Every structure is written in structure tokens, then in C-alpha cells.
Image (tube, rainbow, N blue to C red):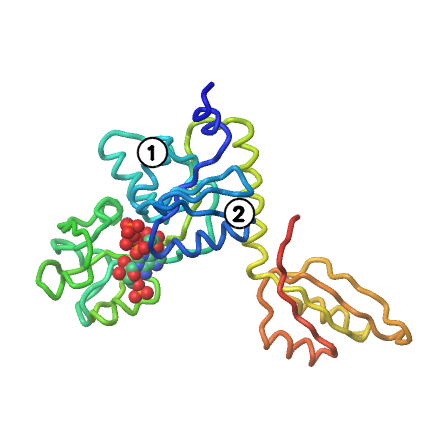
């Protein structure tokens, strides 16, 4: 076996968006998983210094193909891109074989139908006979077919939100996160086609055992990273008599540690991991229930 083949058999290749909305959160997640990357001169590859995992930086639209064709073992990409690709392949009689390994907690958005403000809307049937501009023709076609609505799909490569103003369409089907782009273009969101977020996908091809082991480790670390993002460690003092009420108020905490307090037989210290954010309102409720000396700390790493 030559060196290239050996390397291919032992180092995972992960496709990540080169420059766009998913780039920073993807790299941030990988860094939290412990990956130290050194970028090559051309910036197209990142070499994992402390894990057998290299990153290939590409356009997000290319990620499903790279994984489907086994050029990369893994990819981080939006569900919207994956589902559009799956339908586009199906239309050509090809079955998408990439597999979704994990839903991720970033890149959240929705693919929605929007119409000009003030336009009459009484459900999807209002789209009958209309022109709808989109960069997601396959997802839109599936949506229309499911609704039993016949409309004309105008496929654009970008700037979808200005199509109605230019007279090119009566409605649009585009990604929305805050809704400010729609508002700026006097459009109103009326229907959701797909709820989306980033996903980790993998090749259909069986991987060498050493690679499979690293995929498992990466998945476990991603799980940990996602859990700690919201988790907090909370410490407080409480009267024994208020224990039941305080346990009820602790958000997402299954089994708090209860410690006696030297010299205070009627009081205990409670330490708990809360798997949800702890808001000021929660602290105020805990205080009202008798808690004191409240301390909330971020959790850095967690392994079940
Ligand atoms: O160059 P490349 O092809 O790699 O990037 P791209 O321009 O195709 O993609 P990019 O970087 O814009 O988005 C990458 C992925 O981020 C998408 O495929 C989604 O999975 C996810 N994502 C999350 C979004 C948004 N939120 C989003 N708001 N992608 C695009 N938008 C756009 C939307 O198209 C619209 O123009 O942002 C505008 C609306 O945003 P709001 O906040 O005004 O509603
Ligand atoms: Zn793209």
C-alpha cells in the first residue's frame, strides 16, 4: 500500500463551508470538540494536528456531492441543502446515499413562502396559478404537490427577495432567520416549507475501523458540546424544609447533590447541573423559596 492510500485509510476528511454562515459555527464546534487545525497556504485544507481529521473548505452546495461520491467521509451542511439535493438526485433517478448522523444546534432557519404585504392569503391554495421565485425548486415543487396546488416555479440563483418588486414573481420561497430581509422588502412570511439547521452527514461507504472509531468519538464530543452550551452548574444554600420546592424549581436537573452544612442542621448546600439555561427569573424564584448564596457557573465539558 503506498503512503497516499494509507493516509486515506486512516485520516477522516470533513467538508465544511469555506466562507458563509456555517463557517464560524462549524469551526467553533470542531474547536470545542478539541480539534486543532492548521490551515494550508491555499486555505482549502485544514490539517488536524491532534486528531486524524482534515477539513476541506468548499462551497456549501458542493458538500452533499463530495460526501455522496466518497471524496469526503463527513460533511457539515444545512438540512435545506441536503433535502434539496436529495430531491434533485431523485428527479434524475439517483438515490441519495449520504446519511444524516447528527442534527446540530446552529444554522437554524426555515424555508418559507412569503407574499407581498397586504396580498390576499387564505392558505397554500392562494398560490394556485401564481409565479413563485426560489433557489429551492425541488423542495418548493414537493411542497406544492403535497398541497395539491399548481403554480409556476421561477428558479433563480440569488436575490430572490427582490423578484416580486421586479415583477418576476408573485411570491417567493426563501430561507428566513430573523425575518428582517423579508420586512425590508415588504414581504410577509405565510407558510413554512422546511425547518432547517446544520447537520453532520457521512459517506455511505464503509470506513476503516480506525476511522469509524474517530467518527464515534467525534459524535460523542459533539453530543457533549451541544449539551454544555445550555448547561449551567448551580450551587446554593437552602433550608431543609424548602428542599422539595427548590428541587422543583431547578431547571432540567435530575439528581442534585445535597450536602449538610457544618453548624447549620436545618440547612443544606445543593449542587446541580441544570441542562437548561438558568435565567434571573429562576434565581429570583429560588430566593423566594428560601435559597441563599446562589452561584451559577458555566459548564465547560460534559461526558455522560
Ligand atoms: O458560498 P456558498 O454557496 O458556500 O454560501 P451560500 O451563500 O449558499 O450560503 P450562506 O452562507 O448564505 O448560508 C449557508 C447556510 O446557512 C444555508 O444553507 C442555511 O442552512 C443556513 N442559514 C441560516 C441561512 C440563513 N440562516 C439565512 N438567513 N442561509 C441563508 N440565509 C439568508 C436568506 O437566504 C435571506 O437572504 O439570509 C436572508 C434572510 O435572513 P433574515 O435574518 O433577514 O431572515
Ligand atoms: Zn451555497
Viewer-nearest residue: 121 or 230: 230
Q: Name the N-terminal-most of marks 2 and 1.
A: 2
Number of the label disc, if any, that sits on residue 96: 1
Tell me if 60 is positioned left or right of 203 in this view. left
Q: Residue at x 58, y 73 (%)?
A: 279
Q: Residues within 10 Å of mark 1 (few under 14, many from 20)?
A: some
Q: Residue 277 location in percent, x, y?
A: 57, 66
Which quarter of the figure has residue 99?
A: top left
Number of the label disc, if any, that sits on residue 35: 2
The answer to the question of whether label 2 and label 1 lie on touching residues, with beta carbons closer than 8 A, is no
Q: How many marks?
A: 2
Residue farthest toward the bottom in the current orientation of the protein: 288
Residue 192 seen by the camera: no
Which quarter of the figure has residue 97?
A: top left
Mark 2 to mark 1 CA distance (whole Å): 29 Å
Residue farthest toward the left in the current orientation of the protein: 167
Q: Residue at x 71, y 78 (%)?
A: 289
Query: What SS does tag 1 mark?
Result: loop
Q: Residue at x 73, y 58 (%)?
A: 255
Amino acid at each position: 500500500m503506498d503512503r497516499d492510500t494509507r493516509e486515506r485509510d486512516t485520516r477522516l476528511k470533513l467538508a465544511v463551508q469555506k466562507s458563509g454562515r456555517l463557517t464560524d459555527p462549524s469551526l467553533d464546534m470542531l474547536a470545542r470538540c478539541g480539534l486543532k487545525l492548521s490551515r494550508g497556504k491555499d486555505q482549502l485544507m485544514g490539517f488536524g494536528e491532534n486528531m486524524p481529521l482534515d477539513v476541506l473548505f468548499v462551497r456549501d452546495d458542493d458538500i452533499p456531492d463530495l460526501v455522496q461520491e466518497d471524496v469526503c467521509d463527513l460533511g457539515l451542511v444545512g438540512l435545506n441543502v441536503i433535502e434539496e439535493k436529495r430531491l434533485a438526485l431523485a428527479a434524475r433517478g439517483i438515490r441519495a446515499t449520504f446519511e444524516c448522523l447528527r442534527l446540530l444546534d446552529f444554522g437554524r432557519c426555515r424555508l418559507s413562502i412569503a407574499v407581498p404585504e397586504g396580498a390576499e392569503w387564505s392558505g397554500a391554495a392562494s398560490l394556485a396559478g401564481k409565479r413563485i421565485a426560489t433557489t429551492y425548486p425541488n423542495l418548493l415543487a414537493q411542497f406544492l404537490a403535497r398541497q395539491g396546488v399548481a403554480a409556476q416555479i421561477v428558479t433563480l440563483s440569488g436575490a430572490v427577495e427582490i423578484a416580486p418588486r421586479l415583477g418576476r414573481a408573485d411570491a417567493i420561497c426563501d430561507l428566513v432567520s430573523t425575518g428582517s430581509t423579508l420586512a425590508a422588502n415588504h414581504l410577509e412570511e405565510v407558510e413554512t416549507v422546511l425547518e432547517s439547521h446544520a447537520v453532520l452527514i457521512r459517506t455511505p461507504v464503509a470506513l476503516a475501523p480506525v476511522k469509524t472509531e474517530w467518527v464515534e468519538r467525534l459524535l460523542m464530543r459533539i453530543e457533549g458540546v451541544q449539551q454544555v452550551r445550555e448547561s449551567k452548574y448551580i450551587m446554593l444554600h437552602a433550608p431543609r424544609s424548602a428542599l422539595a420546592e427548590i428541587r422543583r424549581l431547578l431547571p432540567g436537573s435530575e439528581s442534585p447533590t445535597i450536602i449538610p452544612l457544618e453548624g447549620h442542621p436545618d440547612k443544606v448546600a445543593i449542587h446541580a447541573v441544570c441542562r437548561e439555561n438558568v435565567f434571573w427569573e429562576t434565581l429570583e424564584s429560588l430566593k423566594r423559596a428560601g435559597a441563599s448564596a446562589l452561584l451559577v457557573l458555566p459548564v465547560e465539558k460534559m461526558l455522560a
